């Protein structure tokens, strides 16, 4: 039983992607976890330096989205849904725009000044820069 649990734990941890937060090349060189969280839950609308932020989220149901929000915003999908439903209903905010793939996120960030997003570390190239690794 002990070996089964160890094997299961190792399989689960290796299945987790190495999520990184990326920015447009003209964006900040780094950001703190709390500042990124604030962008993704609507508490802030600006990047360091005052540039308007354009946070980009993956669509629901993607493992990398769940990993990002668990590690950075501290919220599950159910908590995010409840939070954004309330924000939208009360007129206090709109959720970040969502794209269907990390390829689309990387492309949007690379082509949009002020944009930030998250992708698997293995997908990083010279078109974007890593500003945070949870």
Image (spheres, rainbow, N blue to C red):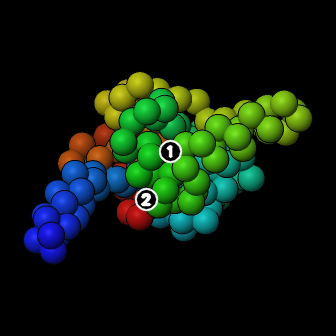
Relative depth, front residue between 108 and 7 = 7
Tell me which corner region of the image, top left, top right, bottom left or bottom right, holds residue 93. top right
**Mark 2: few, some, or many residues within 10 Å (few <14, many ≥20)?**
many
For image coordinates 36% across by 29% down, the residue present is 101
Q: Give the x, y percent position of residue 11.
A: 17, 57
- Secondary element at image label 1: strand
Query: Looking at the rendered structure, which numbered label has been put on residue 131?
Result: 2
Asked if one can make out residue 107 in the rendered structure from this viewpoint, the answer is: no
Q: Residue at x 13, y 65 (%)?
A: 4
83 horizontally vs 47: left or right: right
Q: Residue 111, percent across and down? A: 44, 31
Q: Which residue is mark 1?
A: 116
* Picture layout, residue 7 above or below residue 99: below
Pick the residue in front: 53 or 88.
88
| Residue 6 higher or lower than 110, as above or below | below
Q: CA distance from mark 1 to mark 2?
A: 9 Å
Tag on residue 102? none
Residue 79 in view here: yes
* Mark 1 vs 2, N-terminal side: 1
| Extreme-bottom residue of the structure | 2
Please state the horizontal and vertical placement of residue 25, each as a whole percent of the image.
Answer: 41, 47
Tell me the quadrant of the picture where the N terminus can be found.
Answer: bottom left
What residue do we see at 36% from left, 54% from top?
20
Residue that appears at 60% across and 42% down: 78
Instruction: Please state the horizontal and vertical placement of residue 54, each as a whole percent of the image.
Output: 60, 39
* Residue contact at pointers 1 and 2, CB within 8 angstroms: yes
Q: In which image quadrant can residue 89 be found? A: top right
Q: Is residue 45 left or right of residue 57?
A: right
**Image position of 44 (left or right of 28):** right
């Amino acid at each position: 039983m002990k070996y089964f649990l160890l094997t299961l734990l190792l399989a689960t941890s290796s299945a987790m992607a190495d999520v990184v937060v990326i920015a447009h090349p003209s964006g900040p060189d780094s950001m703190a976890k709390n500042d990124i969280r604030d962008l993704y839950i609507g508490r802030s609308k600006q990047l360091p330096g005052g540039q308007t932020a354009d946070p980009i989220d993956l669509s629901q149901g993607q493992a990398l989205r769940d990993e990002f929000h668990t590690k950075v915003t501290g919220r599950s999908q159910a908590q995010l849904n409840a939070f954004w439903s309330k924000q939208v209903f009360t007129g206090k905010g709109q959720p970040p725009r969502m794209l269907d793939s990390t390829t689309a996120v990387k492309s949007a960030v690379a082509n949009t000044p002020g944009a930030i997003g998250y992708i698997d570390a293995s997908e990083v190239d010279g078109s974007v820069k890593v500003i945070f690794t949870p």
